[in-house]
Amino acid sequence: MAGDQSPQRRHEDAASGANAGMSAVSYLIGGMAVWGFAGWLVDRWLHTGGIATAIGCVLGMAGGIYLVVRKLSI
């Protein structure tokens, strides 16, 4: 039955869910930070006024979303 799970098993399920959530958040923030920084460097080099930074942030978030979907769909 569903109510027959031990408290230890429920704790492990909650921990794995928390790990997946933290992993998803870190992919999204990390992608935006790394690619945003790369875009900022391109902006400084080409004097484009923030366009490359915005593009880098959007690409980083798209890459992070891709990695989250790939990781959680297993």
Image (tube, grey):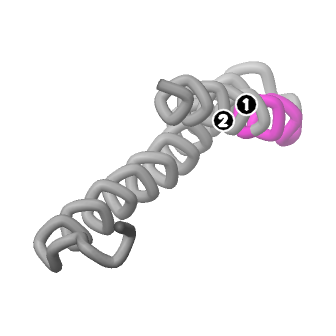
Q: Residue at x 61, y 31 (%)?
A: 69
Within the image, what quadrant is residue 28 found in? top right
The quadrant in which the N terminus is found is bottom left
- Are the residues at dot 2 and dot 1 in contact (C-beta closer than 8 Å)? yes
Q: Which mark is residue 7?
A: none
User: In the rendered image, which residue does mark 1 sit on?
Assistant: 62
Instruction: Sort mark 1 into few (<14), some (14-19) or many (20+) by Cα contacts within 10 Å.
Output: some
Q: Amino acid at mark 1?
A: Ala
Q: Considering only vertical position in the picture, is 31 above or below 28?
A: above
Front in this rendered view, residue 73 or 60: 73
Residue 31 spot, x, y in % from top left: 55, 36
Quarter assignment of residue 45: top right
- Taking the magenta stretch, the answer to whether it contains residue 39 is no
Q: Nearer the viewer, mark 2 or mark 1?
A: 2
Residue that sits furthest to the left in the current view? 8
Residue under pointer 2: 65
Q: Is residue 7 left or right of residue 40?
A: left
Q: Which residue is painted at 40% across and 50% down in the image?
A: 20
Of residues 42 and 27, the one nearer the viewer is 27
Relative horizontal placement of residue 11, taking residue 55 as reference (left or right):
left
The residue segment tinted magenta is 49-57
| Whether residue 65 is visible | yes
